[in-house]
Amino acid sequence: MSGIRCLAEMKLDREPFALDLILEIGPGGSYLTSEHTLNHFRDFWQPALYSRLRINDWKQRGSKRLAGRLREKTIALMRRAHTPELPVSVLMEIEYIRKRA
């Protein structure tokens, strides 16, 4: 799911907040088997770079810290990036400025 999802409009009515369900099930109850959870569990935005793994699972997968994951993501984005070619007139102007500097 895209990170942009977190910027989307948030509905403030009864359905997304499941107030009726909260009152029905109450504290300590299980929401996992409710129809509401089934209908909405994919709506929740989950960050792609923060790890929510338990410590043992995190260690088994290489113990990558956030800085390392950020670096890998940045490099992958840079490799996929396409830099458009500049028009010849712009390249000539850059060269002119470079020679004068």
Image (cartoon, rainbow, N blue to C red):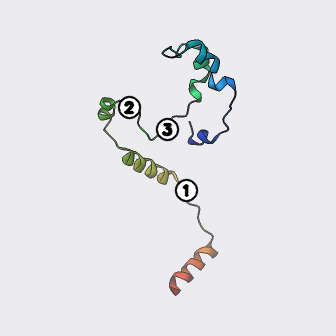
Which amino acid does the dot numbered 1 rest on? His
Mark found first going from the N terminus, 1 or 2: 2
User: Within 10 angstroms of label 1, few (less than 14), some, or many (20 or more) residues?
Assistant: few
Foreground disc of the pair 1, 2: 2
Which residue is denoted by mark 3 in the rendering?
47
Q: Secondary structure at mark 3?
A: loop
Residue plotted at (54% across, 80% down): 95
Image coordinates of residue 52 in percent, x first then y, are 41, 33
Residue plotted at (57% across, 39% down): 2
Q: Secondary structure at mark 2?
A: loop
Q: Is residue 57 left or right of residue 89?
A: left
Which amino acid does the dot numbered 2 rest on? Leu
Distance, label 1 to label 3, CA atoms, is: 25 Å
Spot the residue most to the bottom. Answer: 100
Q: Against 87, is 56 above or below? A: above
Which residue is denoted by mark 2 in the rendering?
53
Which residue is denoted by mark 1 in the rendering?
82
Mark found first going from the N terminus, 2 or 3: 3
Residue plotted at (52% across, 87% down): 100
Foreground disc of the pair 1, 3: 3
Q: Is residue 60 left or right of residue 90?
A: left
Distance, label 1 to label 2, CA atoms, is: 34 Å
Task: Return the residue nearer the eye: 22 or 82.
Answer: 22
Quadrant housing the N terminus = top right
Distance, label 2 to label 3, CA atoms, is: 12 Å
Image coordinates of residue 26 in percent, x first then y, are 54, 15
Image coordinates of residue 33 in percent, x first then y, are 54, 13
Q: Against 94, is 46 above or below? A: above
